[in-house]
Image (cartoon, rainbow, N blue to C red):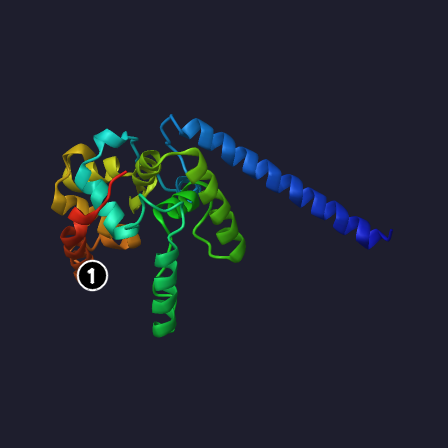
């Protein structure tokens, strides 16, 4: 066996060990977070490392306004209650839209996929990250029920510069707890998720308000877990 082949064999073995350690860590955290509040995520860690401060307060499923849960589903993942983590119809529709526009204008990520990215990964786009996101998505769907997934998503989503979670967002923008959000407020907060740092300073933006109106029209169609 040559020195080069030995090197690559050892490198491969090290990568396998790193992958195993990573997934063991993910599984361990998912087991803990299945019943315990989540007060940190990879996105929050990255924000702190960048010199920013984080505001986030965990709230349980029943302490989040039904309108906020409905708004999240109709905006981000209309088939959330019925799929296994991947919305194949949504992915196909997004691919067709991107092909017709010639750009990556639409995505097909479900709430579970977004949660996997927020908790364990970064916003950097690559095939490796997408592969990790897919595998973690399967783990989340296998270990948590849909209520827990939606609760975690709304608690770690970014709603502005250093503002994480629906509770912190409700207090920051409306001076009230997430349990007291009305339909207009819920739709507006969920509309911000596509570009929260920008919309934080542009709350009257036409695209934001248009999306708010669309979410409000569709809200009654949401199937809650």
Examine the rendering and report whether any part of residue 195 can be seen.
no
Residue shown at 28% from the left, 38% from the top: 225
> What residue does disc 1 label?
207
Provide the secondary structure element on which disc 1 rests: helix
Q: Quadrant of residue 151?
A: top left
**Residue 3 in the image: above or below residue 104:** above
Residue shown at 33% from the left, 40% from the top: 153
| Foreground of the two, 156 or 134 | 134
- Callout 1: few (<14), some (14-19), or many (20+) C-alpha neighbours within 10 Å? few
x and y percentages locating residue 91 in the rendered image: 38, 59
x and y percentages locating residue 104 in the rendered image: 38, 66
Toward the front, the furthest residue is 82
Q: Quadrant of residue 90?
A: bottom left
Q: Is residue 103 left or right of residue 214?
A: right
x and y percentages locating residue 97 in the rendered image: 34, 68
Residue shown at 26% from the left, 32% from the top: 61
Toward the right, the furthest residue is 1
**Residue 199 in the image: above or below residue 16:** below
x and y percentages locating residue 125 in the rendered image: 47, 57
Examine the rendering and report whether any part of residue 137 can be seen.
yes
| Foreground of the two, 83 or 105 | 83
Q: How many marks?
A: 1
Q: Is residue 14 left or right of residue 79?
A: right
């Amino acid at each position: 066996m040559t020195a080069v082949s030995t090197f690559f064999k050892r490198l491969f073995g090290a990568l396998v060990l790193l992958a195993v350690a990573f997934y063991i860590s993910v599984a361990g955290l998912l087991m803990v977070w299945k019943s315990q509040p989540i007060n940190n995520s990879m996105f929050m860690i990255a924000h702190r490392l960048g010199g920013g401060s984080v505001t986030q307060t965990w709230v349980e499923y029943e302490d989040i306004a039904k309108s906020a849960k409905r708004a999240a589903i109709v905006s981000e993942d209309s088939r959330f209650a019925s799929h296994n983590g991947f919305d194949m119809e949504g992915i196909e529709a997004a691919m067709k839209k991107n092909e017709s526009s010639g750009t990556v204008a639409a995505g097909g990520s479900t709430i579970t996929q977004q949660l996997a990215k927020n908790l364990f990964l970064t916003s950097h786009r690559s095939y490796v990250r997408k592969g990790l996101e897919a595998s973690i998505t399967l783990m989340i769907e296998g270990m948590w029920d849909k209520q827990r997934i939606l609760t975690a998503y709304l608690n770690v989503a970014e709603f502005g510069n250093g503002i994480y979670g629906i509770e912190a967002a409700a207090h920051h923008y409306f001076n009230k707890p997430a349990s007291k959000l009305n339909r207009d407020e819920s739709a507006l907060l969920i509309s911000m998720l596509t570009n929260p740092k920008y919309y934080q300073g542009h709350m009257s933006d036409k695209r934001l308000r248009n999306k708010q109106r669309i979410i409000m029209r569709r809200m009654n169609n949401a199937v809650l877990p």
